[in-house]
Image (cartoon, grey):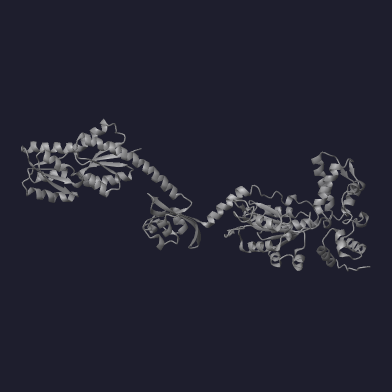
Amino acid sequence: MTRIVFIAPNKQLFLLGKKAVKELNLEEIIDVSFARPRRAVEMAKHLYNEGVDVIISRGGTASIIESEADIPVVEIKISGQDIAQTFQQAKLITGLPNPKVAFVVFRNMSNNIEVLSDILSIRLSIYAVNEMDEIPAVIEQIALTDADIVVGGARSVNLAVKKGLKALLINSGDHSIKAAFLEAKKVAHGRRIEKERTQKFKTLIDYSLEGIISINSEKEIDIFNPTAERLLNLSQQEMKGKKIEENLPFAGIDACLQENREIIGQITQFSHRWLSYNLAPILVNQTSVGVMITFQDVTLIQEIEAKVRQNVIAKKFFAKYSFENILGNSPEITETKTIAEEIAKVDATVLILGESGTGKELFAQSIHNRSQRKNGPFVAVNCAALPPNLLESELFGYVDGAFTGANRKGKVGLFEMAHYGTLFLDEISEMDKYAQSRLLRVLQEKQIMRLGDDKYIPIDVRIIAASNKDLATLVDEGSFRGDLFHRLNVLPLDIPALRERNNDVLFLAQHFLTVSKQKYQKQLAFTTDSLAFLSAYTWPGNVRELMYLVERLVIITNTPVLTPEVIQHYWKNKRLSNHTVAPDRLAAAPEAEKITGILRDCNGNIKHTAEQLGIDRSTLYKKLKQYKIEVKKSY
């Protein structure tokens, strides 16, 4: 609510003010008080602290309040009519047609006095003062003259009377008082609007997440908000009024101040913090009167960016599988899951090795969902599915104009999408040498650069790589970088092939049959012979091959019982001749015996033996060494 106080310097003016407030119906917003000049100043300061918008007063009192109190003052003007009435009263009091009048007046009240004195035949002497303390000396001076009457304010009149002089108090008329009250109402309204704007601006400055510093044209600090205090570990009181260039390392202030030029996206280091800052000129009538500096802690920007990435990108990239989805009860798969669960507890790079179809991505997703990054994105990319040039742009992203056909807005790379999460690089063995070198740098530096850009972007990503090829052999052959292999091979995880998982074929076959029967609403069952038949197969496609075979059998088989003959019949459409051997030879045979038998049948040919077993040559060599099987070729 608007608050205005009229401080009357004399009782007569006090009473006139009371009357004017009532007649103008302003009782709710204007209070009337009586106070001598010195006390009026203290009262005005107190009223300012209480939130009063405007003070109304007159003459010397108004002048003193205005100079000593930080509050708007509306002065009751001494009108020509008021002066004319005063001169007429002086004639009556002195009984003279053209009396000598000594007019003691504050400089803010001296307008038009001489003009009216000439018109009214007043012999006028004006004694203008600036302060109350000057009045006694002026009265002493007047007492030595032949003045007929002293005209002035309350203090001047009192001192003149004590000296035995005739004196007349100058008063303001009803019209002047009302005009001042109505003007004060307008000023108070504008003041209230300005207060609201100022408070909004102050709140914006004080509660901004950015540090804000304002400097004037002399480069002196006049605004230093709480965030600036916190980020720079400096107090507002300490910094206000100081030269910015002597205390803070914000480059470009001269260019901003002199050229009216914005400077955006600069980086500086202050103490242990890296700050991103912007400079903007403060313009009044196209002239720069200062500079506004806004800045943030780079770490906070990264955290906000990470939250945005999580909220926007992570909705599209998430891991849906966990260790509970990895089925099997063999010692081999149980031990692998145990190792993987331990790997999930730490945040190092993982290299998953295993044949196609063993569930490498299933393990990667499970590790992610058990790790401290489980709330972040899980981004998967098959390195073999993309040509080398496209793979690079997908991984690292690109900026506008990076290459012909590039999106005009640029593109965020998979590394950025996986920030605070996991990036799964499947079939990493198919990555070309150049991409390998860039990946190695990312792993070492923890930052990426988009194609066509010249700025590095920090990232926090866990890498899980996977390969169905022996990377160590590829390193020996020169097709894979050795330094990258060692950087990836921090936590290796070998996924056993299905043929190496004792009895898991039976368990998984029954599980997939149950799932497919529910999905396609059929009733089927394996015979004991058919399960033995499935167990004897080497499963080069591993769990994936078994799952799709069972689903195919459920869809196309019309018999309620799945016998070996039925299974073999629907396998005729599969090109299995190079991958399987007679079931009766392999049933329940230990792995070493299987390898030895097939090796003999293939006349010691490693390539053909590996094909029959459904494994690659490097794996076969390992097993030959493990079981101490000697290779003998026959011709």
User: Where, quadrant-wise, is the C terminus in this rendering?
Assistant: bottom right
Residue 290 horizontal side relative to residue 350, left or right: left
**Residue in the foreground of this view, choosing between 442 and 56:** 442
Q: 359 or 283, which is in the foreground?
A: 283
Res. 420 visible in picture:
no
Q: Quadrant of residue 59?
A: top left
Residue 357 placement (x, y as % from top left): 79, 54
In the rendered image, is residue 628 in sight? yes
Picture coordinates of residue 394, whole percent (x, y):
66, 55
Quarter assignment of residue 79: top left
Q: Quadrant of the N terminus?
A: top left
The percent coordinates of residue 190 (x first, y second) are 34, 40
Horizontally, is 205 left or right of 40 in the view?
right
Please name the residue shown 62% across and 51% down the image.
Answer: 407
Left or right, 422 with respect to 205, comes to right
| Image location of residue 208, percent across then percent down | 47, 50
The total number of labels drawn is: 0
Against 356, residue 112 (above or below) is: above
